[in-house]
Image (tube, rainbow, N blue to C red):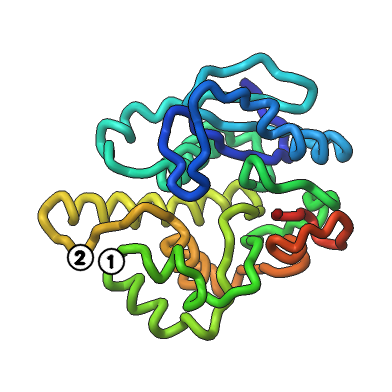
Amino acid sequence: MQIEPNVVISQFFTHMEDLLHHADTSNVDIPSKVAEQTHSLARFNVPYYVLTNDSTQEPIDNLHVVNVNLDKIYQSYPDMTLYFYRIFMTFYFLQAHPEIEKAVLTDATDVTMLNYPFDEIKPDTLYMGDETAFLFETDIILNNEGPQYLQDFFLRNGNLLPTLNLGVMAGTRAVLMEYLGMMVKLITEAKLKFKQGDERYRLGAFEMAISNYVAYEYFQDRLVHGRKVTSFFSGFQPHSSAWFKHK
């Protein structure tokens, strides 16, 4: 399968527990679930790839629903949640398609494109959406288990840095693979140490802590976030100069 150079990519898992939204993920019609984003991307003639653990479907206009085989990851880490699995899924897809030049990674069901981003994406820059809350105000980070270096980072920076949201991120293929690859490395290291009996490396259910840590710790001089990338989080703004609306 040949992929276009500039694409938007989402993930959609079926038959797995959605701890955050408590949604029914069985018997899901993926095209209908992502219809709003599909329509917004079609306005700009942007190809849309939805990666899934379900079967591949025939393309519908600009929408491509593509199965990514995660059997080896399921076998190695059977207790991980879909929030961590989606990091591996997207990393593998980008790794398999060097023809991709730039990509935007989005949540599937609550993101829409407002303005065309690809002409403005610069090399060696990671773009991410953010929230109005600081790290120390974000329950999903504070109440989530994680290795000590994560806890130390949030103690130092919790009231200084806004919460980045993985629901919209953009960059060149190289930058996105670097970012996702660092998360894959830290996740697999934590899983190995926990399996060896070190309880301090329990990861918990959600990936937001490790995603913020990697962005701020490893991309601090190459990170762009805020109203260039997304309108106000949960702001319900149909019109904005931002690239995307997230909720």
Against 214, residue 190 (above or below) is above
Against 24, residue 135 (above or below) is below
- Residue plotted at (79% across, 22% down): 61
Could you tell me which secondary element the residue under label 2 belongs to? helix
Q: Residues within 10 Å of mark 2 (few under 14, many from 20)?
A: some
- Residue plotted at (56% across, 77% down): 134
Identify which amino acid the numbered label 1 is placed on: Pro
Left or right of 185 in this view: 223 = right
Label drawn at residue 78: none
- Residue plotted at (73% across, 40% down): 6
Please name the residue that numbered disc 1 is placed on.
147
Q: Is residue 143 visible?
A: yes
The quadrant in which residue 4 appears is top right
Identify which amino acid the numbered label 2 is placed on: Arg
Tally of numbered tags:
2
Q: Are the residues tagged 1 and 2 within 8 Å (C-beta)?
A: yes
Mark 1 or 2, nearer chain start: 1
In this view, the residue in front, 5 or 165, is 165
The quadrant in which residue 125 appears is bottom right
Left or right of 171 in this view: 190 = left
Find residue 11 and report its horizontal and vertical position in percent.
56, 37
Alpha carbon distance from label 1 to label 2: 5 Å
Label drawn at residue 200: 2
In this view, the residue in front, 81 or 119, is 81
Against 55, residue 214 (above or below) is below
Image quarter where the C terminus lies is: bottom right
Find residue 205 and report its horizontal and vertical position in percent.
36, 52
Residue extending furthest toward the left: 197
Against 153, residue 72 (above or below) is above
Find residue 126 and report its horizontal and vertical position in percent.
62, 61
Left or right of 78 in this view: 61 = right
Q: Residues within 10 Å of mark 1 (few under 14, many from 20)?
A: some
